[in-house]
Amino acid sequence: MLIVATLLLGVTGVKAQPFVYPKRMVVQFSGMIKDNISNAPIPFAIVYVDKEKRGTVSTIDGFYSFAVAQGDVVLFKSIGYKPYKLEVPKEMMGDSYFKDIYMERETYALDTITIYPLPRPHQLRQAIANLDIPDDMVALAKKTIEKSKLDELTKATRYDGNENFNQYLKNQVQSYYHYGQPAPIRLFDAFSWAEFIKSLKKKNKSIGTDKNGESVFPEF
């Protein structure tokens, strides 16, 4: 009896110790995300830990890097590719883990859709019957007169849209050509004087006489 009592006292005197889960080591998870066929990098792919708000986005070169814990399940997602899931090894040496991810392309099949101009095909006949076609000669004459007025205004205009634009460009080029310095004066331009004298000589050669012996000047 003495032995049993001693054992009972020893058991009751020991406090229960709580279960301690093993501590997971944090590692730097890095790598490249690529296409499994072309081996091209996949930019701006989403990389995050499943069921947690921790992650990153791959760079334009497909590189990713962020901190995870051993045993975390990491998801990789990108538009046009199937989601990829990876579990970080629970037993590993070192504080970094490098892994290249090759994602498979996703194929989307869309149902065929027929688009009609009206909600229902049989409403087309009713729409044609109620179509307002201008058969009034007065209305047609007014449209013709308005068009003729527009043509007259177009003829009276010095330049049309294209010509105005080209003239504006020429003026801009001319202003940029002499930018930062005064524009030259044509009066002191030797080449301009040479052209002027040459044109005068050409005009003098064209001067003739009529049947009465009087000089006849060409019309300009």
Image (cartoon, helix red, strand yellow):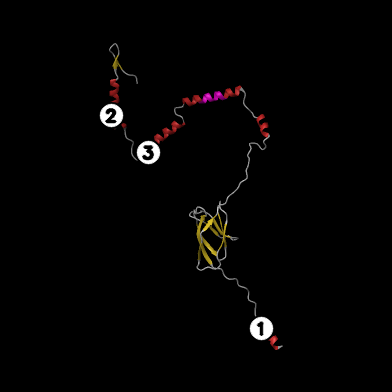
Answer with mark 3 or mark 2, whichever residue precedes in sequence.
3
Q: Nearer the viewer, residue 153 or 187?
A: 153
Look at mark 1 in the image and give the residue it sits on. 10
149 in magenta: yes
Q: Which residues are magenta?
A: 143-150
Answer with mark 1 or mark 3, whichever residue precedes in sequence.
1
Is residue 55 among what the camera can see?
Answer: yes
Q: Nearer the viewer, residue 41 or 109?
A: 109
Question: What residue do we see at 55% from left, 24% from top?
Answer: 144
Answer with mark 1 or mark 2, whichever residue precedes in sequence.
1
Amino acid on which disc 1 is placed: Gly
Look at mark 2 in the image and give the residue it sits on. 194
User: Could you say where residue 38 lies in the image, as x and y percent from the top left?
Assistant: 50, 52
Look at mark 3 in the image and give the residue it sits on. 176
User: Could you say where residue 173 lies in the image, as x and y percent from the top left?
Assistant: 38, 37
**SS of the residue at dot 2?**
helix
Query: Which is in the foreground here, disc 1 or disc 3?
Result: 1
Question: What residue do we see at 57% from left, 23% from top?
Answer: 142
Amino acid on which disc 2 is placed: Ala
Q: Residue furthest right?
A: 1
**SS of the residue at dot 1?**
helix
Question: What residue do we see at 66% from left, 83% from top?
Answer: 10
Q: Are marks 1 and 3 in contact (CB under 8 Å)?
A: no
Real-space Cα separation, disc 1 to disc 2, in angstroms: 128 Å
Real-space Cα separation, disc 1 to disc 3, in angstroms: 103 Å
